[in-house]
Image: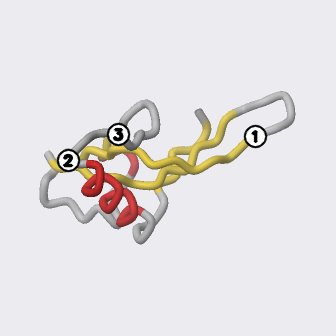
Amino acid sequence: MSWNYRVMKHVSKSPMGDEEYLAIHEVHYRDKDVDDLTVPVDEIGWSEEPTTVQGDDELRWSLESMLKALDKPIIDVGLE
């Protein structure tokens, strides 16, 4: 299994109508050799909550990895 950070599009219901938002999540792939640019949503798992930035030595690595997520297609998880 492999993982990286990805931008995910969420849609939530509200009294004012559907609300869309983007968030960065940890995404886990079933196959370590998967093409993460074209993988279908049903072939991945992701962190329930969007990721946060915290830590000591790994802080720079985390931020740089999150920035790479901006260069990949957004994963649309649809209505929650």
Front: mark 1 or 3: 3
Q: Is residue 5 above or below residue 47?
A: below
Mark with earlier residue (1, 3): 1
18 horizontally vs 79: left or right:
right
Q: Is residue 34 above or below residue 41?
A: below
Identified at 39% across, 43% down, the residue is 53
Identified at 37% across, 35% down, the residue is 47
- Type of amino acid at the residue the image marks with label 1: Asp
Q: Determine which residue is flagged by label 1.
A: 18
Identified at 64% across, 42% down, the residue is 11
Q: Determine which residue is flagged by label 3.
A: 54
Q: Mark 2 falls on what kind of element? A: loop
Identified at 76% across, 40% down, the residue is 18
Closer to the camera in the image, 78 or 64: 64
The residues bearing labels 3 and 2 have C-alpha atoms spaced at a distance of 10 Å
Q: Determine which residue is flagged by label 2.
A: 57
Q: Mark 3 falls on what kind of element? A: loop
Classify residue 80 by image quadrant. Answer: top right
Contact, mark 1 vs mark 3 (Cβ under 8 Å): no
- Type of amino acid at the residue the image marks with label 3: Gln
The residues bearing labels 1 and 3 have C-alpha atoms spaced at a distance of 31 Å
Q: Report x, y in % for residue 63.
A: 35, 56
Q: Mark 1 falls on what kind of element? A: loop
